[in-house]
Image (cartoon, rainbow, N blue to C red):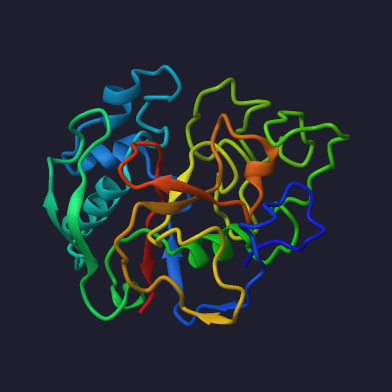
């Protein structure tokens, strides 16, 4: 995980390279969770309610957005139950139902049902390690389609120059028009996953600790849910800059902020 010091646009302190091993195979949704999938379980259209189409596509085939982290956990449980699968999370003491209010609920107690998220066969959020492994699909470059072209100085982190390597694979600030788009319109990575760079930021289940994850060798990190203020968001969004589309890029997003979308995974057993 992480990025090498020579990668253009990297987060100097947030993307320390870490040798990471995953010992459990897993399935991942090929596209970001759609508004139709979110609503199929009876959940209200939070994307429409909180955004009204200003910055988010609200068609059924578009990715659900404007969701907070607690809502994402609760939806994963609800989707598991709807599919006849075990729930992976214990989510208690929530201030309100999902889809209510501008920012959604906060929940006092969240934990994993069982020894580890990797042991649960229901739907869940990916760990940060699973997400990056899937996004890279075996690649070592900044994106799964190749490296970014360095922008001449004095370019800033907010630079939104067109990147040829991103055009076929990503909805980002230079081509998205400031809004999300239906999933699957851009080319997938080598493992058939669409929009792993851009369109909508995707929650992971980990706690964002400090600036970077530990550089030491890790095995199955993020197996438990740890209480805290923020989680890593991955993938970048439709208004994100080219730097934010890199596979190693990570943001610390407040768990109470209704800012992201999601892509569910299941441990393969």
Question: How many numbered circles does the render carry?
Answer: 0
29 relative to 198 in the view: left or right: left
Q: Quadrant location of residue 177?
A: top right
Indicate whether 107 appears above or below 131.
above
Give residue 17's quadrant in the image.
Answer: bottom right
**87 left or right, relative to 200:** left
Q: Is residue 68 left or right of residue 151?
A: left
Looking at the image, the residue that sits furthest to the right is 152
Using the rendered view, name the quadrant where residue 258 is placed.
top left
Q: Residue at x 51, y 24 (%)?
A: 179
Residue at image coords 49%, 66%: 130
In the rendered image, residue 7, in percent from the top left (x then y), is placed at: 78, 55
Q: Quadrant of the N terminus?
A: bottom right
Q: Viewer-proximal residue, 242 or 106?
A: 106
Across and down, in percent, residue 18 comes to 63, 73
- Examine the rendered structure and indicate whether residue 8 appears above or below residue 46: below
- Of 265 and 239, the residue lying toward us: 239
- Where in the figure is residue 34, as x and y percent of width and height? 37, 39
Q: Is residue 64 above or below residue 125?
A: above
Image coordinates for residue 143, horizontal then vertical, percent:
70, 51
Residue found at x 30% / y 25%: 50
Q: Quadrant of the C terminus?
A: bottom left
**Residue 5 higher or lower than 72, as above or below:** below
Q: Nearer the viewer, residue 80 or 256?
A: 256
Spot the residue most to the front: 210
């Amino acid at each position: 995980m992480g990025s090498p010091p020579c990668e253009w646009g990297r987060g100097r302190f947030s993307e320390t390279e870490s040798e990471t091993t995953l010992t459990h195979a897993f399935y991942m949704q090929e596209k970001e969770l759609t508004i139709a999938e979110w609503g199929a379980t009876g959940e209200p259209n939070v994307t429409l309610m909180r955004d009204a189409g200003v910055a988010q596509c609200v068609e059924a085939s578009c990715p659900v957005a404007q969701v907070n982290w607690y809502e994402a956990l609760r939806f994963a449980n609800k989707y598991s139950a709807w599919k006849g699968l075990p729930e992976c999370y214990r989510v208690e003491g929530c201030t309100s139902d999902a889809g209510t209010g501008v920012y959604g609920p906060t929940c006092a107690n969240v934990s994993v049902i069982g020894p580890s998220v990797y042991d649960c066969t229901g739907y869940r959020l990916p760990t940060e390690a699973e997400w990056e492994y899937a996004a890279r699909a075996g690649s070592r470059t900044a994106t799964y389609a190749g490296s970014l072209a360095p922008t001449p100085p004095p370019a800033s982190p907010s630079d939104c120059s067109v990147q040829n390597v991103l055009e076929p694979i990503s909805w980002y600030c230079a081509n998205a028009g400031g809004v999300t788009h239906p999933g699957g319109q851009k080319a997938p990575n080598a493992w058939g996953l669409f929009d792993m760079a851009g369109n909508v930021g995707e929650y992971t289940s980990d706690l964002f600790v400090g600036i970077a994850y530990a550089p030491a060798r890790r095995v199955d990190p993020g197996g438990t849910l740890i209480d805290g203020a923020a989680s890593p968001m991955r993938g970048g969004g439709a208004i994100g800059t080219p730097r934010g589309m890199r596979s190693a890029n990570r943001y610390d997003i407040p768990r109470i902020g209704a800012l992201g979308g999601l892509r569910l995974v299941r441990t393969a057993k």
